[in-house]
Amino acid sequence: MINAIVFGLVGLGMLFAIIRLIKGPTVADRVVTLDTFNVITIGLISLLAFKFENSLFLDVALVYAILAFMETIVFGRYLEGKHGDR
């Protein structure tokens, strides 16, 4: 029962992040939303590791977190070079 509630709330958070990603008025808002979506995805993978009692999911979550961090750095550098979009 509690698993359904937790996974439902995580899904709701992902839905709101996708809506914000689509409606974001600026590119910076979309980058922040994408980072939020990545954090929620890492949490979801960790919850799946707990649910299925498989530690391999934690390794996947760790690699995903590193790649998501690199993605955020790249987008930040890209936005830093774009001075006209505020």
Image (spheres, helix red, strand yellow):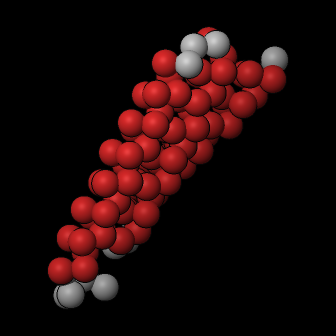
Q: State whether residue 22 is above or below residue 52.
A: below
Residue 77 occupies quadrant: bottom left
Q: Which residue: 49% across, 18% down? A: 56
Q: Which residue: 43% across, 55% down? A: 35
Q: State whether residue 56 is above or below residue 47.
A: above
Q: For this rendering, which residue is in front, 57 or 1?
A: 57
Counting from the top left corner in percent of width and height, residue 73 is at 31, 63
Counting from the top left corner in percent of width and height, residue 65 is at 43, 44
Q: For this rendering, which residue is in front, 76 or 60?
A: 60
Counting from the top left corner in percent of width and height, residue 50 is at 66, 21
Residue 57 visible to the viewer? yes
Q: Quadrant of the N terminus?
A: top right
Count of all numbered marks drawn on residues in the image: 0
Q: Which residue: 47% across, 33% down? A: 61
Residue 22 visible to the viewer? no
Q: Quadrant of the C terminus?
A: bottom left
Q: Which residue: 47% across, 47% down? A: 37
Q: Is residue 28 left or right of residue 53?
A: left
Q: Is residue 23 left or right of residue 52?
A: left
Q: For this rendering, which residue is in front, 56 or 9?
A: 56
Residue 67 occupies quadrant: top left
